[in-house]
Image (cartoon, grey):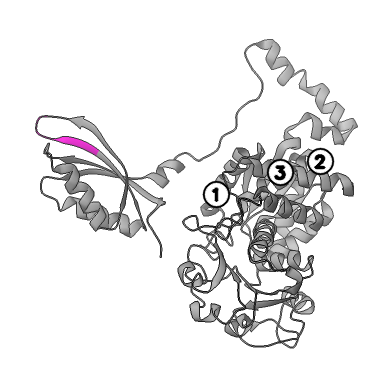
Amino acid sequence: MPVPGPGYSITVRLEAPPSASAAGDLTSAVGHAGGVITAFDVVESHGDRVVIDLTCNALSANHAKDITDTLETLPGIVVRKVSDRTFLVHLGGKIEVTSKVPLRNRDDLSRAYTPGVARVCQAIAENPEDARRLTIKRNTVAVVTDGSAVLGLGNIGPAAALPVMEGKAALFKKFAGVDAWPICLDTQDTEEIIRTVQILAPVYGGINLEDIAAPRCFEIEARLREMLDIPVFHDDQHGTAIVVVAALRNALRVVEKDIKDCKIVVCGAGAAGSAIIRLLLQQTPGDVIAVDVEGIVHRDRENMDVNLKSIAERTNKKNVKGRLHDALVGADVFIGVSAPNLFGAEQVATMNSDAIVFALANPDPEIDPMEAQKHAAVVATGRSDFPNQINNVLAFPGVFRGLLDAHARTITDAMLLAAANAIADVVTPDQLNASFIVPSVFDATVAGAVAEAVRKEAAAAKV
């Protein structure tokens, strides 16, 4: 199922004989090793040799080494150097701070810094709300993590989480013009995280919590929302939920079903699954069945934490019991935010006709998309190499753009639903089909549409 991708792209600098067959031999060798060539550049030419930069995509770091080893076996080929293009992107970090004002002479310095800046400080001291107008607060978001649940890597700590947070900050700037900064905390103590964010908050117009493990993430977000006068948004929860709800709205249009008649199975009851369920319930579905590693969540289950108890009280109307395969029988929709390879085509066949399958575990989904397509009418994943990629970048830049523009002090479920509807509506009726239920992450209209929807909802709610 996986195909070579740019995440494991390498550039091999090598020497080759100046023969007519050299290029063909090299490309054939890469192809036989399972790689995909994306560039072939001659960087030096001599009478007895040519120096070539051969760039190709691989499946993994081990696969990249296999490709290199294969090239080295060719007669007359000398591999000089292998560069991992992903690591090259990260050299020195991916973001920087730049000044918005010129500092060319003493006059500039006197206004941007002392003595002129003192007048601005005094104005803010007299009216703290002016900080939103006169400082970076009006356009700045803190991306906060403790490194406890990073991507699919688990608890790898704050330093190892930093490349992800840098990437998040870069996406904020690219798609919504928001200045975001990584805050990677060297603690996984709930109280320390809450207190640290609280005392950092005056600088920022919003807090984006990221990659903090459940169930601590629920308490951290809830308590910060109570104590801060700026929006607090846990993207692993609400960003995922927004895009899932947007995609589901359009998928149901494709299969001509009403959510009020649908049985929806949500596999995974952690941060993302809980938020998806919460947002789905706002739209009164026929029923929602939550499933985790222990099976179907039901009201009689023992040893449930507070989050699971809350889910059990609001879902599973008939209080059914069993495993994932049992839950899928007669279901209209499957939404997975859990683990790879949990079921196959034979289980999809037990779902209702025109079934919808969102298998979002990354990098390997709950079911092979090709298997799901044997019986499902619409299939989505979190991957970029299949249609219908459910990607948080469709949501969070525009959400925060709207919150910042509205000077919002909190965020509500109504804003989340407004964002979801805005994403869904970017896909026009003439574009909508089983392979296109959400817009591309590079669609420049998405962030603006989401921002405007959130801004309007915030203004109407006066929050």
Mark 3 vs mark 1: give the one in front: 3
Q: Is residue 430 above or below residue 252?
A: above
Q: Is residue 158 left or right of residue 371?
A: right
Mark 3 vs mark 2: give the one in front: 3
Q: Is residue 219 above or below residue 308?
A: above
Is 48 contained in the magenta span?
A: yes
The amino acid marked with disc number 1 is Leu
User: Considering only order in the chain, which callout, 2 or 1, is on the residue closer to the N terminus?
Assistant: 1
Res 103 label = none
Q: CA distance from mark 3 to mark 2?
A: 14 Å
Q: Nearer the viewer, residue 414 or 388?
A: 388
Disc 3 secondary structure class:
helix
Res 406 label = 2
The amino acid marked with disc number 2 is Ala
Q: Is residue 340 left or right of residue 98?
A: left
The boundaries of the magenta stretch are 47-52
Read off the residue under disc 1.
Answer: 162
Spot occupied by residue 99 in the image (x, y as percentages of width and height): 63, 26
